[in-house]
Image (cartoon, grey):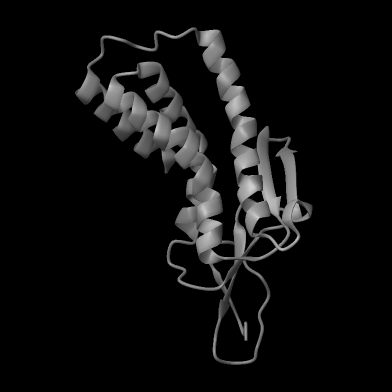
């Protein structure tokens, strides 16, 4: 999902600014900033989780999924849908969209490419947002061991079902 968006934004950059200046900044610095950006990306998730969670930073977990070398941040508390959406989107907004549009506006190719890279890197977050796109209310809890989350949505009966992965609903009485 992130790749088509990054591709369209890359083409937009080329239309607006042309192809003359293709990443004039030092590549080593770009790589260092990318690696630092990955850490900061997860810290932003953590900071927003901590801002909304009752137990603050004690509810936040960081780690690396070693088989895929993917860093992650999760929260052990269920949060409302609007808060969870903000948590998912914030790093891509800060490290992806803002640098991209600043680079686009001022013809700064290195900054625009940095933004594109982080839009692409936010693909996991975009996937989660896509999976919960039809939800309108309820509580969302990060899945304890899979990529995604569990959505607990209210319903009228008093029955309770077991948690299911993102994209599926677990209708429970939240009253």
Q: Is residue 112 left or right of residue 153?
A: left
Q: Position of residue 62 (x, y in %)?
A: 73, 43
> How many numbered dots are placed on residues in this image?
0
Q: Quadrant of the N terminus?
A: top left
Q: Residue at point 49% right, 62% down?
A: 132
Q: Could you say where residue 143 lies in the image, as x and y percent from the top left?
A: 67, 58
List x then y, in percent, for residue 18. 22, 17
* Residue 120 visible in this rendered orientation of the protein: no
Q: Is residue 14 left or right of residue 64?
A: left
Q: Position of residue 25 (x, y in %)?
A: 44, 9
Q: Looking at the image, can residue 72 be seen?
A: yes
Q: Does residue 54 lie above or below 145 as drawn?
A: below
Give the vertical position of 69 relative to 74 (above or below): above
- Residue drawn at x 41%, y 29% as measured from the top left: 99
Question: Quick one: 152 or 99, which is closer to the camera?
Answer: 99
Residue drawn at x 57%, y 20% is 33
The vertical placement of 24 against 58, above or below, is: above
Q: Residue furthest bottom?
A: 157
Residue at point 75%, 56% (across, down): 59
Residue, far right: 58
Between 120 and 164, the one nearer to me in the picture = 120
- Left or right for 16, reference 175: left
Quadrant for the C terminus, please. Answer: bottom right
Q: Quadrant of residue 144?
A: bottom right
Between 142 and 3, the one nearer to me in the picture: 142
């Amino acid at each position: 999902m992130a790749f088509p968006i990054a591709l369209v934004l890359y083409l937009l950059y080329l239309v607006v600014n042309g192809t003359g200046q293709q990443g004039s900044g030092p590549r080593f610095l770009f790589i260092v900033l990318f690696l630092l950006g990955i850490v900061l990306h997860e810290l932003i998730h953590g900071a927003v989780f901590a801002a909304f969670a009752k137990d603050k930073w004690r509810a936040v977990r960081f780690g690396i999924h070693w088989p895929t070398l993917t860093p992650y941040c999760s929260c052990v508390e269920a949060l409302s849908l609007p808060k969870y959406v903000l948590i998912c989107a914030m790093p891509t907004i800060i490290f992806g969209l803002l640098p991209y549009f600043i680079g686009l506006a001022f013809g700064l190719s290195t900054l625009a490419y940095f933004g594109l890279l982080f839009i692409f890197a936010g693909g996991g977050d975009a996937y989660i947002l896509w999976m919960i796109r039809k939800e309108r209310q309820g509580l969302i809890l990060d899945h304890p061991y899979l990529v995604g989350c569990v959505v607990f949505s209210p319903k009228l009966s008093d029955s309770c079902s077991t948690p299911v992965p993102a994209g599926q609903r677990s209708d429970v009485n939240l009253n």
